[in-house]
Image (spheres, rainbow, N blue to C red):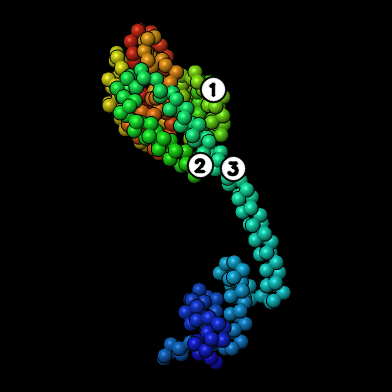
């Protein structure tokens, strides 16, 4: 028998390590004095310590080591061979991720910037700022906020494994890269209905199915007349804005949908937790301006 201090010196470790091995069920002392609590080991247990230490260094789990402690050396060597092959596969996967890392980072940066620039470009029309009661020179936080919100939202979607889709008129672009490509190709320039969503969704009839009206105004002159009355949109529900306006209304401008998205993101916290916003614009039958907000 040898004391824990002597056994620790023999094994080249400290007593704390041996107590830890005992606690997790890997290497118990041969005897514990019932009066003093002193721990004693057999010198032959040093062979077990060597096996445990080497298996730990080879990245075997505690449960795997417990199994291997009861096997012969031939079985343990075969386990080492399997671990080597496993680590080779892990290394190959890391190399693959490493090679793709810079390309993916560049793709993400370009796609996000493309979407941001598209929204900014659509927001350049002075008459749209006036329609919302905003001043492009003083209200730069609108652009800053929409950058922040959309970037966070896109990051959240990717972290959750959710795809990003953009609907414009009757066309869907699915995936961040595809959305960016459609914007770069100018396909969305004349779109009067835009939905930025977390997953692929059906079109208007499906969006409105089981939706309820939460806000409506009729006969207004400018969006600013009712903008502050729109409820908070910070949860993850789908929202559908349906505009029916006069022919001469700035709402018919092709950039209105993007401006609406930006203002809702900045002022009403839309998209902070996902969801989507649809903004559909058409001419009214009575020559007046109408807006309805639905959600589901």
Q: Which mark sits nearer the N-terminus, 3 or 1?
A: 3
**Is residue 257 in sight in this rendering?**
no
Q: Does residue 294 appear to the left or right of 28 in the view shown?
A: left
Q: Which mark sits nearer the N-terminus, 2 or 3?
A: 3
Q: Which residue is mark 1?
A: 186
Question: Closer to us: mark 2 or mark 3?
Answer: 3
Tell me the CA gap for discs 3 and 1: 24 Å
Give the image location of residue 189, x and y in percent. 50, 20
Q: Secondary structure at mark 1?
A: loop
Q: Image height check: is 63 above or below 165?
A: below
Q: Does residue 3 appear to the left or right of 91 in the view shown?
A: left
Residue extending furthest front?
Answer: 137
Give the image location of residue 259, x and y in percent. 39, 25
Question: Closer to us: mark 2 or mark 1?
Answer: 1
Q: Which residue is mark 2?
A: 158
Q: Image height check: is 162 above or below 135?
A: below
Say which residue appears at 55% left-offset and 92% top-offset: 1
Q: Secondary structure at mark 2?
A: helix
Q: Image height check: is 128 above or below 285?
A: below
């Amino acid at each position: 028998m040898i004391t824990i201090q002597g056994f620790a010196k023999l094994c080249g470790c400290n007593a704390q390590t041996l107590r830890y091995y005992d606690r997790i069920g890997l290497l118990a002392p041969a005897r514990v004095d019932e009066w003093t609590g002193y721990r004693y080991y057999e010198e032959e247990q040093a062979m077990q310590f060597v096996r445990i230490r080497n298996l730990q260094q080879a990245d075997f789990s505690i449960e795997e080591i417990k199994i291997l402690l009861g096997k012969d050396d031939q079985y343990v060597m075969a386990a080492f061979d399997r671990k080597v092959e496993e680590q080779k596969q892990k290394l190959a996967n890391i190399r693959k991720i490493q090679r793709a890392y810079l390309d993916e980072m560049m793709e993400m940066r370009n796609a996000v910037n493309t979407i941001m620039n598209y929204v900014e470009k659509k927001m350049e029309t002075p008459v749209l700022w006036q329609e919302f009661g905003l001043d492009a020179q003083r209200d730069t936080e609108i652009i800053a906020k929409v950058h922040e919100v959309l970037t966070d939202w896109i990051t959240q979607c990717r972290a959750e494994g959710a795809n990003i889709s953009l609907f414009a008129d009757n066309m869907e672009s699915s995936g961040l890269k595809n959305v960016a490509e459609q914007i770069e190709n100018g396909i969305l320039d004349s779109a009067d209905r835009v939905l930025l969503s977390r997953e692929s969704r059906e079109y208007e009839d499906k969006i409105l199915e089981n939706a309820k009206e939460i806000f409506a105004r009729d006969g207004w002159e400018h969006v600013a007349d009712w903008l502050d009355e729109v409820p908070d949109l910070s949860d993850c529900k789908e929202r559908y804005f349906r505009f029916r306006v006069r022919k001469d209304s700035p709402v018919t401008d092709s950039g209105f949908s993007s401006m609406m998205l930006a203002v809702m993101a900045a002022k009403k916290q839309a998209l902070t937790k996902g969801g989507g916003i649809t903004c559909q614009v058409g001419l009214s039958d009575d020559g007046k301006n109408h807006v309805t907000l639905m959600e589901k």
